[in-house]
């Protein structure tokens, strides 16, 4: 399966986001990893695990991003979802599960509503900065939502700690 060039071009940007918001890590779970799982595995080796709904992308786990029950609570340093949130049936459940699994940091990215006007049939939800911030703050108070490279980024910090 060939990986689209625009996805490969985002790999350094995503790696920089992890470094900025978490630093070094021992374990990372990529929820909705898609075709990039092979690139991440080359980069991070045994630190990396990917989950996707499709077994054709060589993910470590095949499953639903909204139900991460096969992973123990507080078991991964970083849990990320690169452009996954708009594809899932229950975004609140997905983000809640990502927070539960993370020891420290959750990072997600998603497109703006304006960039989704072509009506990608796999996008079940469209996000604005306000709606993304509302979702994230309902799940965890220690968070940040911002824009970079024409995408929105949401970060949840100190995920294993009690709510603020």
Image (cartoon, rainbow, N blue to C red):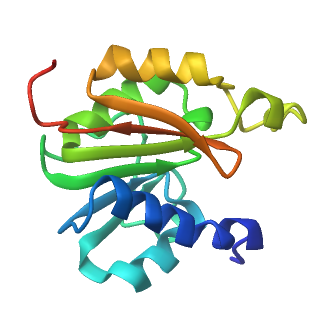
Q: Is residue 142 visible?
A: yes
Between 13 and 39, the one nearer to me in the picture: 13
Residue 158: quarter of image: top left
Q: Is residue 152 left or right of residue 93?
A: right
Q: Residue at x 25, y 73 (%)?
A: 47
Between 26 and 86, the one nearer to me in the picture: 26
Compared with residue 28, is residue 9 higher up or lower down, i.e. above or below?
below
Q: Position of residue 56 (x, y in %)?
A: 57, 67
Q: Position of residue 155 (x, y in %)?
A: 38, 39
Location of the N terminus (image quadrant) = bottom right
Give the farthest residue toward the right.
Answer: 118
Q: Is residue 131 left or right of residue 115?
A: left
Q: Residue at x 31, y 27 (%)?
A: 96
Q: Residue at x 74, y 66 (%)?
A: 6
Residue 131: quarter of image: top right
Location of the C terminus (image quadrant) = top left
Q: Residue at x 31, y 82 (%)?
A: 45
Q: Is residue 118 left or right of residue 20?
A: right
Compared with residue 134, is residue 142 higher up or lower down, i.e. above or below?
below
Q: Position of residue 19 (x, y in %)?
A: 35, 64
How many marks can you see? 0
Compared with residue 110, is residue 134 higher up or lower down, i.e. above or below?
above
Q: Position of residue 145 (x, y in %)?
A: 48, 32
Q: Is residue 31 left or right of residue 67?
A: right
Between 111 and 119, the one nearer to me in the picture: 111
Q: Is residue 56 visible?
A: no
């Amino acid at each position: 399966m060939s990986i689209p060039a625009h996805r490969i071009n985002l790999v350094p940007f995503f790696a920089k986001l992890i470094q900025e918001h978490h630093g070094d890590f021992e374990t990372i779970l990529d929820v909705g990893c898609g075709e990039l799982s092979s690139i991440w595995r080359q980069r991070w080796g045994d630190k990396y695990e990917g989950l996707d709904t499709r077994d054709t992308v060589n993910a470590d786990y095949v499953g639903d991003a909204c139900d991460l029950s096969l992973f123990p609570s507080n078991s991964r340093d970083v849990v990320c979802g690169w452009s996954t949130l708009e594809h899932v049936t229950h975004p609140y459940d997905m983000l809640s599960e990502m927070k539960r699994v993370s020891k420290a940091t959750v990072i997600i990215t998603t497109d703006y509503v304006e960039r989704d006007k072509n009506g990608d049939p796999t996008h079940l939800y469209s996000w604005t900065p306000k709606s993304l911030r509302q979702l994230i703050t309902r799940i965890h108070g220690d968070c940040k939502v911002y824009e970079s490279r024409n995408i929105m980024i949401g970060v949840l910090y100190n995920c294993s700690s009690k709510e603020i």
